[in-house]
Structure formats: C-alpha cells, structure tokens
Amino acid sequence: MDPPLVTRFAPSPTGYLHLGHAFSALTAWQRARAAGGQFLLRIEDIDIRRCKPQFEAAIIEDLAWLGVDRDGPVRRQSDHFADYGAVLHRLREMGVVYPCFCTRADIAREIAAAQSAPHGPDGPLYPGICRHLTPDERRARLEEGREFALRLDVGRATAIVGSYRFHEERLGWIEGQPHLYGDVVIARKDTPTSYHLAVTHDDHLQGITLVTRGEDLLPATHVHALLQKLLGYETPRYAHHRLLADAQGRRFAKRDQSLTLRVLRQAGASPQEVRRRVGFD
Ligand code: GLU
C-alpha cells in the first residue's frame, strides 16, 4: 500500500499572496484532500531581510479565507537555523562543501575573462574560483576574517552519489543532472542555510511524499534530488504545475500587487469566486 499522501505549500513571506499563489496552494491542498492525505504549510523565511512577519500573518489569514485548511503546525524556517546547521555539518564532514569568499563582482570579473562560461537555468554558473584555493589560501582568508558562503562541490557530491533520478508527474522519470546549476550556494554569507538546503531538509523532515510547485522550480529539483541522495533522504514525487498568467499573459509576480487575495477580497470577491477564477470549483 502506498504511504499516505503528504503535500505542502511553502510560500516566502515577502509580499501578499496573489492569484498565482492561490492556484499553487489549491493544487497542493486538493491533491491532499482528494487522497485523504495531509496538507502542510511551511513559511520559507530564511531571507530575514526580505521576509516580514506581517506577510506571514497575512498568508495564514488569506489561506483560511480561501478555505484552504492545513494539517499540523506551521513550520517557520527561521526558527530552525540550528537544524540546517546540523545538516551543513554533515555535508562538511562528507567533504562536499567549501567556503566561497567571492563577491558578486569577483564572480562577474572571472566570468567576463573566461573564454566560454557555462550557463545554467539562471545564467552563468559559478566558475569555481574558491574550489581551486589551496588549503593555505583558504586558511589565510579565514584568518583574515573574510566573510564566506558555503558551496556544494558538485563534482565530489556526484562522485559519492553516482547517478540519480526523480519522478515528475507529467514527464515521468528524469535522470538527475547534478551540474545544471554548478556549485550551488548551500549556506549564504548572511544566512546559515540556503533555499536548496532548507527545502530539501524540510521536505524530508515533514515527510512530504508529493511536492507540488511551479514549473519554474523544476530545474532546482535536480539539485534537491542530489542533496536527498547525498543525505540519505527519500526522494518525494514531484508535480510541477504550470504558472498562472494574467490577462496579458504575464506571470504573476510579487511586485504586481493588483491581484493579491487581499485586494480582491476588499473589492468584494468571495472565496468561491477566487477559487473559480484560478480553475478550482
Ligand atoms: N518558497 C518558494 C517560493 O515561494 C517555494 C519553494 C518550493 O515550493 O519548493 O517560491
């Protein structure tokens, strides 16, 4: 028998929920409810400069208004930096992370000087400057008190993990491409984790069996599945949904505040109308 379905909605509280979020939340919620499973809410607020408590409160209120009820407590990532620290420690022990002292300018300079710079889904990949530091150079920078991020040494990680794959509902089994994003940041200079690390750990910890999220995050799943294999976590199943667009065909974005659930509600829309508008009756 299949394990019970556990899905989640994992917004970052950097603004009010808009119709695109409503679609995403309802997608996960409906899957859980249809299967008699669980729907969890996670607040992804590791970027403590951009995330605001009032947006978190608004997310919780707006979901309740929309009729999206949740199971279990809300997990707020900023309450769990120590958990991510412990996972980082494991990765360090495995020898698959290295400190990166580069500034954005250092990286841009190196890329500009390179003959050909490999690109990933979000632009040029990190050219590996700090991966090539000698132990002495690394020590010297640490002793100088230079700030650093931690990056995943994808080559080493791949050597440990070998091949891996994940299941995407529309696309079937997908062979993992560990180098797609290059040596990703696993802990930022200002935050003791990163999106990739926190989301992978939390999906595991919360027993998520089906990750539903926008198709813009499909490439990131290659990184998450790699981390899962490295950490000995089960890989959940994935269902990446299309991104809802506005009447002009543009994707909803946080900067576009006109179609937030708040504004629609203040203008007199009912939860049923909003649900219908994004395709849920
Ligand atoms: N926190 C991410 C966002 O708001 C979603 C991450 C995920 O669902 O994996 O875009």
Image: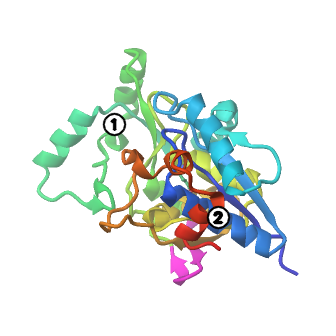
Disc 2 and disc 1: Cα gap in Å? 58 Å
Q: Earlier in the sequence, mark 2 or mark 1?
A: 1
Boundaries of the magenta span: 161-175
Residue type of the residue flagged with mark 1: Leu
Callout in the foreground (2, 1): 2
Residue 124 picture location, percent across and down: 25, 54
Residue 224 picture location, percent across and down: 55, 59
Residue 122 versus residue 244: which sits nearer the camera? 244
Up-down relation of residue 230 to residue 150 (above or below): below
Examine the image and state in which quarter residue 3 appears: bottom right
Up-down relation of residue 208 to residue 30 (above or below): above
> According to the image, label 2 marks what residue?
272
User: Which residue appears at 78% of the width and 69% of the height?
Assistant: 33
Residue 245 versus residue 37: which sits nearer the camera? 245
Answer whether residue 249 is magenta in the image. Answer: no
Examine the image and state in which quarter residue 122 appears: bottom left
- Of the 4 image quadrants, the one containing the N terminus is bottom right
User: Which residue appears at 59% of the width and 43% of the height?
Assistant: 44
> According to the image, label 1 marks what residue?
133
**Whether residue 211 can be seen here:** no
